[in-house]
Amino acid sequence: MVNRPTINKIDVFDASMPADIEFCWQGIQPYASRLYIYESDASSESSQPVFTQYCESIRLRQQIPANTLKNSHSYYAVIILYDSVGNPSEMSYRQYFSCYSAPALTFTGLETDGSTILNVSGFNVTVTYSQAENRPISEYSYTLYDSYKTPVYSSGSKYQSAGDGNIITCPLKSLISDCTYYFSIDVISIDNVCIHSPLIEFSVYYSTPASCSALNAVCDRDAGYVKYSTNIIDVQGHSSGEYVIDNGILNIISGTVYYNTGFSITSDFTFAVRFMGGTSLCLYSSPDTDSSVSGSRITLSSLEYEGRIHYRLSISDGVLPPVILYSDFYDKDAMRTVYVRRKNNLYSLYVATGGEI
């Protein structure tokens, strides 16, 4: 006769999918088993099982077919084993379990087909967790991989605060231009159900000044000379408006200067501005003199927050909502050089720090 079996712990599973019930025993080899599944509140001996299955096999598991049970319900399982001549064992003790729908993840900012191209070095991936019975998140972790699918950053286990609900924010920083990355996330529910996202591919491309110096020197060893070049253009347009040049600095605080001739930006460009806290600069261009034709507006400003400032670049074509770039935070009173660059119709914002010019 086979000894009383023991059903192993049954994790939460989705009733729309098949599930294995595993068990163990001590003693002689069983040759068959009969599994019974009851509603968890079925306490009387006369209660009828919602599922029963007889299986002639020496395997240590039985499988519950898909859609046999119902999600958002709790059950318990018992099992009886049979020896080679049909003698039954004692019935196992109850093993309780629950069924809940499988959770799902959706992503904002990253396309799962790998088509996303980011134009910034830092980015927040927003992940929305959904589950039909509203079972909450217990913890999550996310990983960033390089183009060889080698992990370059792992968040470790993070716990969701009550105020965040089912929205998970995953900051990605120090992304390198002209590189391909992969992103994945694991989310564990309060029922210990883990959902693992596939590797999501994305690319990074952004422009930064190749050099922060005013002059670029190239040595031609064969010809025996050094070639100097610069991207600085001396604009000789006609201006209107009041301004003051003090110690080599054009001071237009609380004023405006218009260059209406001899000054045209039609392709890629880089301009630099020496900034103090509170300064704001607006560039506006129009395709012709007809004021009814919309042009492009570039607004570069500094914003103060808790005694520090950061720089804000807004680009608008007058039709669609503006595209906005933000820099990091810096000391409020320091003079800094801020670069704005347009290349292939992509904009970048760079702030020189320390002794950079």
Image (cartoon, rainbow, N blue to C red):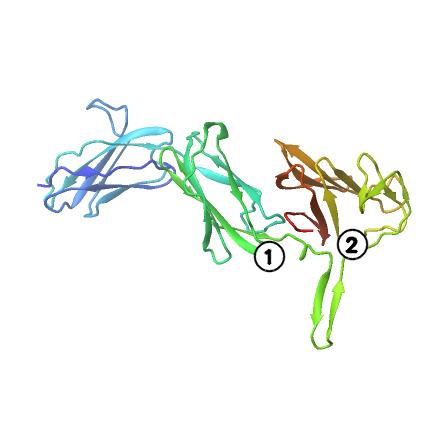
Q: Residue at x 48, y 32 (%)?
A: 166
Identify the mark at residue 344; answer none if there is no mark.
Answer: none
User: In the rendered image, which quarter is residue 276 located in?
Assistant: top right
- Residue 316 located left or right of residue 155: right
Task: Give how far across and how far down residue 101 sits, in percent.
Answer: 41, 35
In space, the residues marked 2 and 1 are separated at their CA atoms by 22 Å
Q: Residue furthest top?
A: 44
Q: Nearer the viewer, residue 353 or 154?
A: 353
The residue under label 1 is 178
Q: Is residue 141 among what the camera can see?
A: yes
Circle 2 — which element?
Answer: loop
Front in this rendered view, residue 356 or 202 = 356
- Relative to 161, residue 60 above or below: below
Residue 267 tag number:
2
* Type of amino acid at the residue the image marks with label 2: Ser
Closer to the camera in the image, 19 or 316: 316
Mark 1 falls on what kind of element?
A: loop
Q: What residue sits 55% from the left and 55% below the top?
A: 180
Q: Residue furthest left?
A: 1
Name the residue type under label 1: Asp
* Quadrant occupied by the N terminus: top left
| Other residues around mark 2 within 10 Å, as few (<14) / some (14–19) / many (≥20) | few
Q: Position of residue 129 (x, y in %)?
A: 48, 36
- Image x and y of residue 126, in percent: 54, 39
Query: Does residue 167 appear to the left or right of 249 in the view shown?
Result: left
Number of other residues with Cα within 10 Å of mark 1, as a class: few under 14, some 14 to 19, many 20 or more: few
- Asked whether disc 2 touches disc 1, contact meaning CB atoms under 8 Å apart, the reply is no
